[in-house]
Amino acid sequence: MEDRISALAQELGEACALRRRKLVLAESCTGGGLGEAITRVPGSSEWLDRGFITYSNEAKIELLGVDEDTLLIHGAVSEPVAREMVLGALRWSRADTGVAITGIAGPGGGRPDKPVGLVFIAWCVRGEAARINHQVFEGTREMIRRQAIEAALKGLIQALRQASA
């Protein structure tokens, strides 16, 4: 998995450099893991603007501008919160492309309507509509987090390709 993540981060860097894009990250359940994977790539400072680790609801509100009502109505692990996270990250950065991840990595915290492994990922290129996907990953906490990071990297690469098409 690490080799796949590193390869995807390298591919993402090449796509950003080719298109002269800058990224911003908003992470919750991955706790900075996406940023760590990206900064393994030499030269990533050329295309990574910044990252926000917003693990608590308060951090999502204060740093990204997620609406408190959105959190109360939908919960932190939801499509509306993922959307507000990525849009807030873009608003508070110099980046033109963003990603946000929010989910339940476990082992606790799940419930029937929001099981452990549920992750929402939002991607957005400035000026375009955000795209949100959700998946239920399986495995240990670490496995869920790694799968979310891999999915976020793949989605960023796809978003960049579609934006330039």
Image: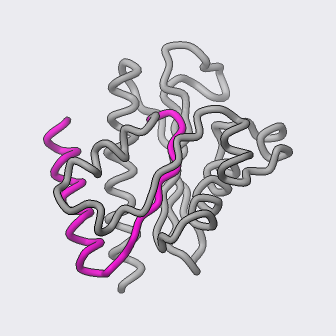
Q: Is residue 30 above or below residue 140?
A: below
User: Does residue 5 belong to the magenta stretch?
Assistant: yes
Q: Relative to residue 162, is residue 125 drawn left or right?
A: right
Q: Nearer the viewer, residue 76 or 94?
A: 94
Answer with left or right where residue 112 lies relative to residue 14.
right
Rendering coords of residue 4 (x, y %)? 17, 44
Q: Residue furthest bottom?
A: 165
Position of residue 153 in the picture relative to residue 4 (left or right):
right
Q: Residue at x 36, y 48 (%)?
A: 151
Q: Give 56 or 94, whichever is nearer the viewer.
A: 94
Query: Could you say which quadrant of the image residue 5 lies in?
Result: top left
The residue at the point 51 percent across, 38 percent down is 119
Q: Position of residue 55 (x, y in %)?
A: 58, 33
- Where residue 111 appears, as percent x and y from the top left, is 65, 19
**In the displayed structure, would residue 104 be above or below residue 97?**
above
Q: Quadrant of the C terminus?
A: bottom left
* Rendered position, 79 above or below 164: above
Rendered image quadrant of residue 88:
bottom right
Q: Is residue 125 left or right of residue 69?
A: left
102 drawn magenta = no
What is the basis of the colouring in this image? Answer: one colour
Please tell me which residue is depicted at 36% across the width and 73% down the height of the picture: 160
For residue 126, which quarter of the picture? bottom right
Closer to the camera, 104 or 54? 54
Question: What is the x, y in percent for residue 134?
Answer: 52, 45
Q: Residue furthest top?
A: 108
Q: Which stretch is magenta?
A: 1-30
**Taken as a whole, is the magenta stretch helix, strand or loop?**
helix
| Residue at x 47%, y 51% (from the top left corner) | 51
- From the viewer's perspective, is residue 145 above or below residue 40? above
Q: What is the tally of numbered marks visible in this picture? A: 0
